[in-house]
């Protein structure tokens, strides 16, 4: 047992990443993100008129790549938001040392709104969301109706009754309102919590007032978070196939968010500790707790993902099986089975030992591995829709894969969004002290023993 | 005349922290067969006593693995091999495994739970009807407000004088040589 940390060990001005140490990585990420964003905008919008019809073009294929990259990185930020809110709501003491990192990760979420901008344009929407095309077609038809619902009611397409029934939720104004709500409401809540926490760093007499305020407000922001994490993935990913539904989809996405948010926090703390920061306020005990939470959510992910598959597989109802039918066709089946062993069995057996969780050298590879499998998980949510959706209107009829190669598009989108994410995350990490050094409970956290 | 066998030395300590410090001394003296007794769990006492990690987790892991294998074999043999059961045109082959997962999960939990309980009882050599320390009247306070250390006579380093000195140096009071009841 090391020595007992007292307030003498905590620097009065906190620990900041030395000036200039991160300047180079931030600049590189910024340049990559900028070039990538310009390139992506060209790919998405040049030679891609709004026709209310999915087309097997580069822009169409890239729309899916962009959605996949967005889903991956937004899930990391949502994970950070969940841990921050849970920390406040549960009045926890152990996590004070890493709370600032959670705050920074969570506050990347509103910035992901910039990445979401293409989804607001009809040129991109037409390739992704069939239901929007149908709504727009019907609203722009020769006969004018009062609203989309009425139009759907009087049209005679065989699919339209589903859209008619769902039109209370799936209509263009409400969709737009929801998308804006996610980023503004949750973003404002998260910025507010970080502001409250950073303000404490300069307060000569920090009391409990801010902690109590954060706890009170967090219980409300937690509700916004629950709505956002669930319906963001409903509106952007599940809506790729408007006919399909699953109430477990949101929680399955949430499980991935929370698991990988924690994995990223572990990776960040390990890298920072290796660089000589957080030495006083963190110990292997913190990594033990974080590892335990990672382990718990490996199991939780498997539980909800399997339950979703299992209920649909068992009930065997046509409307529900379409999702897994597509994902069990061709090579997608291999990827689905790979998830069972790769995303659950292997990390489960690896993380089950308590000493592994305390060894940074072993945790770095497992966190990176979890990111890769999480990317595969989201890829299987998004990419199998690409082929059938884009080729449905072609002369040869729908096919499983789009005609052109997609791997470079997927990589470009992933690197662009990743660089943007890293740029925002690293910049905010460098901007404040790495832990709330004037938090009344920082010593409790520093001397954690579990 | 009946000859009683010596069980060991029992010493009382004032407080939990005194017990903790004494435990460190006894550990450093190299004793193996000894134990601390307190009315409530003391955080970190296992480290102060230099106790090795229990092998129970390995037993539980083995039990859980046996559970998952048992469940799979049970379900697969009955539902696929002996009497192929077709439900809602589901396949009867290795891809039926998805239907067995709830059973595999439940039996993993059940077997792990049983291994935990019975493994724990076996490692602690419970249940037993009596314990030599119950011969000591003052030991009754171990469940109320007494903190005790008992060093057993079967410890290789046990000796009537040195052990007594060790416990006295560590701050022990009310030293008592406990003898096993005549049988």
Image (cartoon, grey):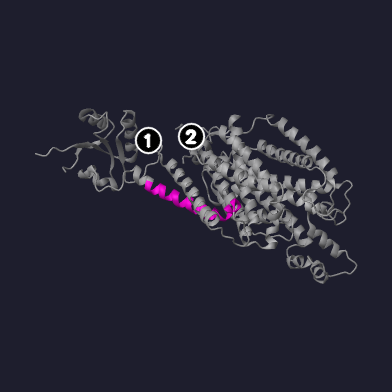
Q: Is residue B85 visible?
A: yes
Query: In the image, is residue B115 part of the stretch drawn in magenta?
Result: yes
Query: In the image, is residue A6 part of the stretch drawn in magenta?
Result: no
Q: Which mark is residue A309?
A: none
Q: Are marks 2 and 1 in contact (CB under 8 Å)?
A: no
Q: Residues within 10 Å of mark 2 (few under 14, many from 20)?
A: some
Q: Position of residue B68 (x, y in %)?
A: 50, 49
Residue identifier under label 2: A5
Q: Nearer the viewer, mark 2 or mark 1?
A: 1
Q: Residue furthest front?
A: B82
Residue A39 left/right relative to A320 = right
Q: Is residue A14 visible?
A: no
Q: Residue furthest left?
A: B1
Residue identifier under label 1: B51
Q: Residues within 10 Å of mark 1 (few under 14, many from 20)?
A: few
Q: Quadrant of residue B32?
A: top left
The residue lying toward the viewer, choosing from A309 and B9, is: A309
B72 above or below B50?
A: below
Distance (Cα) linking label 2 and label 1: 26 Å
Residue A145 left/right relative to A276 = right
Q: Where does the magenta region start and end?
A: B93-118
């Amino acid at each position: 047992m090391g020595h007992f940390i007292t307030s003498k060990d905590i620097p009065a001005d906190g620990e900041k990443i030395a000036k200039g140490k991160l300047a180079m990585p931030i600049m590189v990420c910024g340049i990559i993100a900028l070039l990538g964003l310009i390139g992506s905008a060209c790919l998405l919008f040049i030679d891609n008129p709004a026709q209310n019809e999915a087309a097997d073009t580069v822009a169409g294929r890239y729309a899916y790549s962009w959605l996949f990259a967005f889903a991956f990185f937004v899930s990391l930020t949502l994970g950070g938001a969940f841990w921050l809110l849970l920390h406040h709501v549960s009045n926890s003491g152990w996590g004070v040392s890493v709370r600032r990192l959670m705050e920074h990760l969570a506050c990347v979420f509103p910035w992901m709104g910039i990445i979401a901008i293409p989804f607001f344009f009809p040129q991109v929407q037409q390739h992704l969301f069939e239901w929007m095309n149908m709504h727009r077609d019907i609203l722009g038809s020769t006969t004018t109706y009062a609203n989309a619902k009425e139009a759907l009611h009087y049209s005679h397409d065989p699919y339209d009754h589903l859209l008619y029934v769902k039109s209370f939720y799936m209509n263009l104004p409400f969709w737009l309102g929801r998308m804006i709500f996610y980023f503004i409401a949750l973003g404002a809540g998260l910025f507010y919590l970080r502001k409250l926490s950073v303000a404490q760093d300069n307060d000569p007499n920090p009391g409990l007032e801010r902690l109590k305020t954060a706890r009170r407000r967090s219980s409300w922001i937690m509700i916004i978070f629950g709505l956002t994490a669930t319906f963001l993935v409903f509106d952007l990913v599940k809506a790729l196939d408007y006919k399909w539904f699953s109430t477990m989809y949101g929680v399955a996405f949430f499980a991935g968010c929370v698991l990988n948010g924690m994995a990223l926090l572990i990776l960040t703390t390990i890298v920072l500790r290796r660089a000589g920061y957080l030495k006083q306020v963190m110990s292997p005990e913190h990594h033990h707790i974080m590892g335990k939470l990672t382990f718990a959510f490996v199991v939780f992910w498997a539980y909800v993902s399997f339950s979703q598959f299992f209920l649909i597989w068992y009930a065997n109802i046509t409307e529900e099986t379409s999702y897994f039918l597509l994902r069990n066709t061709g090579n997608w089946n291999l990827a689905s089975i790979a998830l069972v062993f790769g995303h659950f069995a292997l990390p489960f057996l690896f993380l089950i030992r308590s000493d592994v969780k305390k060894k940074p050298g072993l945790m770095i590879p497992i966190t990176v591995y979890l990111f890769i499998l999480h990317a595969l998980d989201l890829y299987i949510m998004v990419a199998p829709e690409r082929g059938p959706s884009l080729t449905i209107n072609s002369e040869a009829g729908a096919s499983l894969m789009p005609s052109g190669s997609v791997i470079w598009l997927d990589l470009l989108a992933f690197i662009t969004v990743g660089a943007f994410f890293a740029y925002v995350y690293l910049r905010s990490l460098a901007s404040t002290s790495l832990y709330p050094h004037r938090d009344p409970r920082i010593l409790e956290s520093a001397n954690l023993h579990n | 005349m009946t000859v009683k066998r010596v069980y060991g030395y029992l010493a009382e300590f004032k407080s939990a922290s005194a017990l903790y410090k004494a435990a460190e001394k006894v550990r450093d003296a190299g004793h193996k067969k000894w134990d601390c007794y307190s009315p409530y769990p003391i955080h970190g006492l296992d480290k102060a006593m230099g106790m090795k990690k229990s092998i129970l987790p390995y037993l539980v892991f083995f039990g859980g693995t046996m559970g998952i294998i048992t469940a799979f074999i049970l379900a697969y043999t009955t539902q696929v091999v002996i009497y192929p059961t077709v439900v809602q045109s589901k396949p009867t082959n290795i891809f039926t495994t998805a239907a067995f997962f709830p059973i595999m999960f439940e039996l993993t939990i059940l077997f792990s739970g049983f291994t935990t309980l019975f493994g724990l009882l076996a490692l602690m050599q419970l249940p037993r009807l009596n314990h030599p320390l119950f011969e000591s009247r003052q030991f009754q306070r171990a469940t109320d407000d007494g903190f005790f250390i008992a060093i057993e006579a079967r410890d290789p380093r046990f000796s009537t004088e040195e052990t007594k000195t060790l416990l006295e140096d560590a701050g022990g009071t009310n030293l008592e040589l406990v003898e096993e009841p005549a049988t």
